Image (cartoon, rainbow, N blue to C red):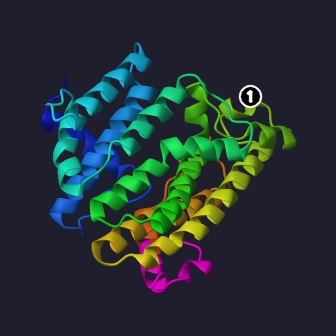
Amino acid sequence: MQSERGHSRELAEKARRENFPVASRLLPRRHRDHLMAVYGFARSVDDAGDDEPGDRLRLLADIEADLVRLYAGQAPKLAPIRALARTVRECGIPAEPFHRLVEANRRDQTVTRYETFDDLLGYCELSANPVGHLVLYVFGEVSGPRLALSDRVCSALQVIEHCQDVGEDYRRGRVYLPGEDLRRAGCPLDDLSAAATSPRLRRVVALQAARAGRLLAEGQTIVSSLSGFARTAVAGYVAGGHATLAALRGARYDVLARTVRPRRARLLAAWARVLMTMRWPGAGLQRLPSA
């Protein structure tokens, strides 16, 4: 079993590789700690479902059993679940979003293709949207309208990540690009394992990126409904989406020949624009300048 210190170091390194600031130093320590605890759980579940050798369904069952143990008032056995204990207690977080993240990775073991974009969004309801709910609980900003807007932002971020990781996902035996879009573009699955991205595959990736951009535009009004540190944090997540979409456009959607990630300067510029633009209700109806 990994030590607490080793787990924290590894987690911090993974957070630095994300498209958005997971727990910015602009936030108070208590918020950073809670966000890292939530991120640590999500990452450990993803790692169990993606990279761990052996019986992944059993590993996911072990995580879920430890989660049940936590909510039953018993001492968890796994480091990521132990790290959640204070966050769950202090932020009053229900168990359901955590269980949905486990279910998403359980689904990954059996479902490897998505026929339509709506099917993919159904997967995002398990794999991404719960994270936004958890963030809102951390800041004590949960409401029905905010949850709905958060879902759009988180689904957008998940689709953007699928655009970036086409080759990596394919090597794992998964294709998140909708099957009907691949067929319409005349794009065979063999294109997903090539050294460079074919023009037909670029068109499919560009289509998903455009859809993600619309979702992000619909959801980013959540920023104008927030204040204080919650507003700063959520604006950073929205900005990460804009900056990554800009990076994809800049790479002309060639996601196989290179690793497409937003530069720090681009992310910071997008973050500032989101904070300046999302100052009043309805601000998200405006189109943000390209990052």
State which quarter of the image contains the C terminus.
bottom right
Q: Position of residue 99 (x, y in %)?
A: 39, 37
Farthest residue, direction front: 72
Note whether 238 is above or below 278 in the view shown: above
Say whether residue 12 is left or right of residue 214: left
Q: Position of residue 268 (x, y in %)?
A: 40, 71
Magenta region: which residues?
271-291
Snapshot quadrant of residue 206: bottom right
Is residue 288 highlighted in magenta? yes
Note whether 224 is above or below 200 in the view shown: below
Residue closer to the observer: 72 or 165:
72
Q: How many marks?
A: 1
Residue annotated with mark 1: 190
Q: In the rendered image, is residue 243 in sight?
A: no
Q: Position of residue 72 (x, y in %)?
A: 21, 33
Say whether residue 106 is left or right of residue 214: left
Residue closer to the observer: 280 or 242:
280
Q: In the rendered image, is residue 180 in sight?
A: yes
Q: Residues within 10 Å of mark 1 (few under 14, many from 20)?
A: few
Residue at point 49%, 83% (across, down): 277
Residue at point 80%, 40% (across, down): 180
Label 1: element kind = helix
The three-letter amino acid code for the residue at tag 1 is: Asp
Snapshot quadrant of residue 41: top left
